[in-house]
Amino acid sequence: MSTISPQYDVRREDLLFCAHPALDRWSDRVNPLLIKEINQQLKSRLFLMIYLLFVLLVWGSSLYMLMMQPQTDQPDFEAGDLLFSLLYKITIFPLCFAIPLGIHQRMRDEFHMHTIEMLTITTLSSGRIFRGKLMCGLLQSGLFLFASLPFLVFCYLLKGIGIVEILTVVAGTVFTLLCFYQVTILYSALSRTRIWEYLSRMSLVFFSTILYFALFFSADAVVLGGISSIYYLVGVLVANTPLYFSMLIFLDAAHEQFKPLRLMRPPFRVRINGEGKVIFLPRLLYQEVPEEYRDPSSNPVKSNQAASKSLAKAT
Amino acid sequence: MSSTELDKSRATSSASTVGAPTDSASPATAINGHPNPGIDAAGTTPERKPMIEVRHLHRFFGKLKAVNNVSFTAYPGQVVGFIGPNGSGKTTTMRILATLDLPTAGDAFVNGYSVIDDPDKVRHAVGFMPDAFGRYPNMDVVEYLDFFARAYGLRGQKRLDALDRVLIFTELRKMAHKPINTLSKGMSQRLGLGRVLIHDPPVLILDEPAAGLDPRARVELRELIAVLSTELGKTILISSHILTELGEICDSAVIIEAGQVLASGTIKDINDKHLKDLADSKNILFITRVLNGQAEALATWLLEQPFVLDANVASELVRFRFEGDVHAQHDLLKRMINSKFEIIEFQRKAETLEDAFMAITKGIVQ
């Protein structure tokens, strides 16, 4: 046991990931934001309640399907596909609604509580902040998928669905969620006013609903409709094109914006300039510097410094 | 700064004179290009580079000139009060120094690094405590500090050591596992200070740290700040509206209004200049205390005397403004005594930083 503050019994073990020196060393390599958000999620009653409800539903639906089986006299009864379809609909519900809305809420809180400013002035890059948020979303999805894993095995044992189909649908879902969560993080950072926050939340619910049904029907097409796994995966890649496109716009705008200004690592904010081009701005610099001062030659001090340097070089 | 150093500092903090870094033995007291580089252990005064240097800083928001040609310098160990009314540009300047904003023109340097050209290096050197202290939900004190230690790139034992010294220094050990959203305002400010200190920066920028604190918490915060500057050599830029308190903590001050610096220098210089201005204007406030309910009579009597501008009564005290020179003052006092007033006190009102501030600023709102 390693003690941090002996007099008041603050121990290393009290910190998540620090229970063992090896784990502690390993945790240094983990994104700090991921550790923070896991800490917070594990203490969040709402998250725990949703998770518990989810587990109960998955248990219940599996038991229901198992109880259905003896009532049939057919020896080749195959209920695996039906159970998978039911489990899948239950599983993707929190993945499409609870997690994106949680991401939106946490991003909104970061801006409202000014914690994003404190994050910005640490040595964390905006990329790490972004990845930390994304990984947290994916980890939560992983928790839900992990909880439904034993029941997915039931599906296989009940016959009617192959392991390839199960893995294909799970992979397609995870890939789609990865794209969706990335756009959700960027989108959540757009909210400026209360009205805009409300609208963005409503639109997020709308897009989540579309995503839910898209995943729902596409998985059913594979499991119940007999579409091949290859077609499904191609469909997933094609259907996610708008999401890659949105990400590319954000990233391109970010690159364009930051290269000339050499600014600090940004939180995320997008605006459209006069020419209709999307510009990615760090939120903290949203009060834009007037155009006439953006050119260093019109900045009296900077131009004086530049002149002094060139003079010093020349002499 | 090692853990031992901080421990020692805490141990001696209770014995140190609170908010009195302006005595002759205190570190640097200089500003605006007149460095008094401080006194080292050997009693010599070596040249030191400025820790904060603001050069012709401008920050415009459209037509609003939030910061308009602000320049000042702060040296190691110095506590600089940044004073100004609301909307005067204090927070904007501080945010630029903390790399949260960019200047429209001019530049600012922290530990020799430009906030424009080397924001990453500036971030290592600065700890910024904004007035709005953001709290994360579902987190306790030690987790909060641990997160920021990780965010500042502290690894392994260094991180644990940093947590240890900050918990000791801010005296938050007892509350290490208390959720941060249940902390009192005073404890929250301590936690904010702990966050600022976690990566041990040489420069601290504190925006209104004492706002909303009760008197005890304010005194405790003042003690911590005094320790940080006098014993740990931190350069501190601090803004506050409680000027009497700043006068006790700071050795220098910059008074800013409408984005422009109106006065800067040591607290003593600013007060002296203000007193000189008052002496020149011959408009001085005097306070007289009399016995046996003579206050009303004295006030009436005073109003009949030459050079007396006004007179007010408050209990046994009579306050009056006088525009005569020292000889006239002497004559007035002599006449007062000859008129059988039972005077037990006669003094010129002591001028404070608050008085200087009120005299220097004009109440301009942008």
Image (cartoon, rainbow, N blue to C red):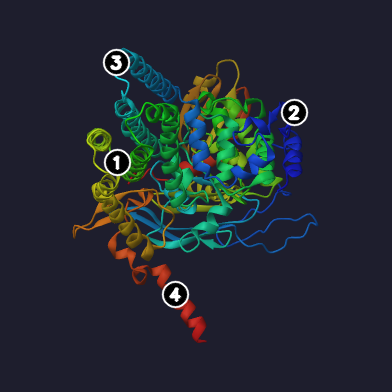
Decide which of A200, B311 is in the foreground and name it: A200
Of the two numbered discs 4 and 1 on the same chain, state the one appearing first in sequence: 1
**Which residue occupies the extreme front position in the image?**
A75
The alpha-carbon separation of the residues under discs 3 and 1 comes to: 58 Å
- The image quadrant of residue B84 is top left
Select label 4 or label 1 by which is in front. Answer: 1
Apparent side of residue A27 relative to residue A88 in the rendered image (left or right): right
Q: Earlier in the sequence, mark 4 or mark 3?
A: 3
Of callouts 3 and 2, the N-terminal one: 2
What amino acid is at disc 1? Answer: Arg
Q: Which mark is residue A72?
A: 3
Residue highlighted by disc 2: A7
Residue underneath mark 4: A306
Give the vertical position of B181 relative to A127 (above or below). Answer: above
**Element class at badge 3:** loop
Disc 1 packing (10 Å; few <14; some 14–19; many ≥20): some
Q: Give the amino acid at mark 2.
A: Gln
The quadrant of the image that shows the N terminus of chain A is top right
CB atoms of marks 3 and 2 within 8 Å: no
Q: Nearer the viewer, mark 2 or mark 4?
A: 2
